[in-house]
Image: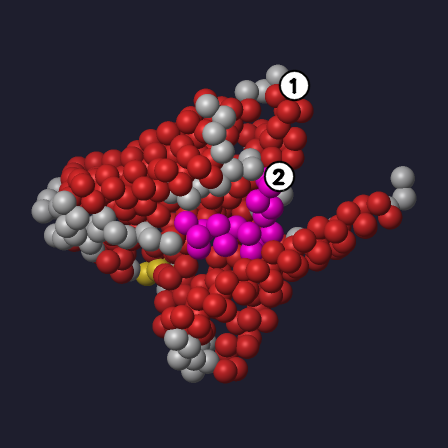
Amino acid sequence: MIKRMVLGEAGIGVALVLLAAIFVAVAPNFATEQNLRNIMTQITLNTVLAVGMTFVILVGGIDLSVGSAMALCAVVSGTFMAGSGSVVVLLGGILLGVVVGGVVGFVNGFVSEQWRVPSFIVTLAMLNVARGAAERYTDAATIYNLPAALNDFGTITLAGIPAVFWVALLLAVAGWFVLSRTVFGRLVYAIGNNEEAVRLSGHKTSRVKIACFVIAGFTVGVAALLYMARLNIASPILGQGYELNAIAAVVIGGASLMGGRGSMIGTFLGACLLGVLTNGLLLMGVSDFERQIITGLVILIAVVLDAYRLRLARRLAIAQPA
């Protein structure tokens, strides 16, 4: 059990603690209460997107469209809610944003499974389709005058923690429960490890994989709503590059891009590590270009270390007595 913990989420947890300790020592104001709240707010969107991305990656897929789909969800929901103070309209806009995300996820999964097209290609196409649709829907205009209640939620704190972060945390917990405590979660891991064996056992693997893309789409809709709550705008150009951050969080958290290996706890810790790294470098005055280089190197190192970790785990398994 101890060995598995060291080889699993504990490793990324230790890395996160060490990184935070370094920034406490060298970055001014890093450990202040206000900055800790800033970090939680900053990692919210990436955490939400990474939760859905985890399901997709576990079944051996990838979703490059989440940033563009997030923009589409935001502008559709935003135009519906703009200028209204009605609670019914607000709830309808929230539901609409999540449904649009789910539809985009369904299209990604259905096309990929129905015509056996790699999800990389399908979601790359959807990246352009969703972005173009968002810009066409609003004529590339930013939507303002969103409901005050939405913005209020984006700025309040509960028990000293930003409300938007509580949403991300609850989604991560829900994702952990589904993956670790349900039959669906076991099928997700099984498909990622050996899809043909799952199919031969009588399960409809295509349905599970499509469902994973739909879950990712729902989280995209939630992320769009949280974005609007924080900034009080809905823009057709938002979300650029967000898909790469979500993938990075999942990979840093120990997931394999080949599928079948990873966890929601690891994903959450990966998102936290990226957020701490970005925030600490910013407080140290590191330029945006240098931050991108450092973040890329951290992702590369995480992948290399994960490869060594997998080899060590295999050796330990072989060394175990029968």
Which of pointers 2 and 1 lies earlier in the amino acid sequence? 1
Measured as percent of width and height from the top left, residue 248 is found at 50, 54
SS for callout 2: loop
Measured as percent of width and height from the top left, residue 135 is found at 20, 45
* Kind of residue indicated by mark 2: Gly
Name which residue lies at 42% across and 44% down: 64
The residue segment tinted magenta is 243-260
Query: 203 left or right of 237?
Result: right
Name which residue lies at 65% across and 31% down: 194
* Kind of residue indicated by mark 1: Leu
Where 16 falls versus 233 (above or below)?
A: below
Label for residue 200? Answer: 1
**Distance of mark 2 from mark 1, alpha carbons?**
17 Å
SS for callout 1: helix
Q: Does the magenta stretch include residue 249?
A: yes
Number of marks in picture: 2
Measured as percent of width and height from the top left, residue 48 is found at 41, 49
Quarter of the figure that contains the C terminus: top right
In front of the other: 106 or 322 = 106
Where 247 falls versus 87 (above or below)?
A: below
Label 2–label 1 contact, CB within 8 A: no
Note whether residue 65 is visible. Answer: yes
Give the residue at the far top of this rendering. 202
Q: Name the residue under label 2.
A: 260
Label for residue 134? Answer: none
Name which residue lies at 18% across and 41% down: 136
Note whether residue 186 is visible. Answer: no
Query: 252 left or right of 64?
Result: right
